[in-house]
Image (cartoon, rainbow, N blue to C red):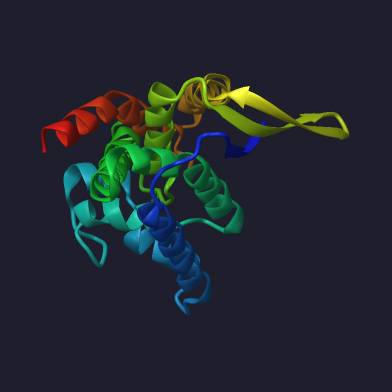
Amino acid sequence: MIPFKDDNPASIFPFITIAIIVLNTIVLLLQITSPYGQQKIAFSYGAIPDLLLTLKVYQPIHPILTVFTSMFMHGGILHLGGNMLYLWIFGNNIEDRLGHFRFLIFYIVCGVIAAYSHALEEPASQTPMIGASGAVAGILGAYLLLFPHAKIHTLVFLGFFVNVIRLPALLVIGFWIVIQFVNGIISKGFAGQGGVAWFAHIGGFIAGFLLIKLFLYSKKDS
């Protein structure tokens, strides 16, 4: 299943959502065109679990700062496209509910929790983690809690046939998080060998699901 839009209009223009998409795109272009090569950039500014936990400084910047730089880096166009598609579909409604500034803070907090979820799962890993997946997963968690019955236009592949079906967010996002858990469990047998940081997705999703009401509550009190 590949979602591509929802039937859940927002009342404000999603400045922050669009700004994040633009910034991620610019960073990828800089990675691709850099004379240093994408691998060296990933090891310099990606979040390396071992360094995040030991705070040893072997990169150009402090390991804690790589939690933030890694959120805006991607491994390629498909990696970027998938993350930004989900952010575009679901981010505007969360930004609508939280407001621009709180949405930005919420996004970053989910990304930070996602990074440390991965680091705690693979504490000795020297493989850098890059991508907005963890922060975007937080947006999905928030959306699932706030709009479980919103209809999502989804491409469903049945052999050689492709159908567009309107499915509730509960089913679309629920299917997504189940896949993350299943792959996360399977990946435990290949810890430290790179690949997808499944537990960053899981950690970010849980953070978004649990924290969204706190952010909404603080908005009411301000």
Q: Residue furthest bottom?
A: 35
Residue 68 in the image, given as x and y percentages of width and height: 28, 54
Tell me the residue at 63%/24% (across/down): 167
Residue 202 seen in this snapshot: no
Horizontal arrangement in the rendering, residue 85 relative to residue 216 (left or right): right
Residue 137 in the image, given as x and y percentages of width and height: 42, 36
**Relative depth, front residue between 109 and 104:** 104
Residue 85 in the image, given as x and y percentages of width and height: 55, 47
**Relative depth, front residue between 136 and 191:** 136
Tell me the residue at 57%/34% (across/down): 7
Tell me the residue at 41%/63% (across/down): 23
Q: Residue furthest right?
A: 160
Residue 34 in the image, given as x and y percentages of width and height: 47, 76
Tell me how many marks there are.
Answer: 0
Tell me the residue at 40%/66% (across/down): 41
| Relative to 78, residue 143 above or below | above
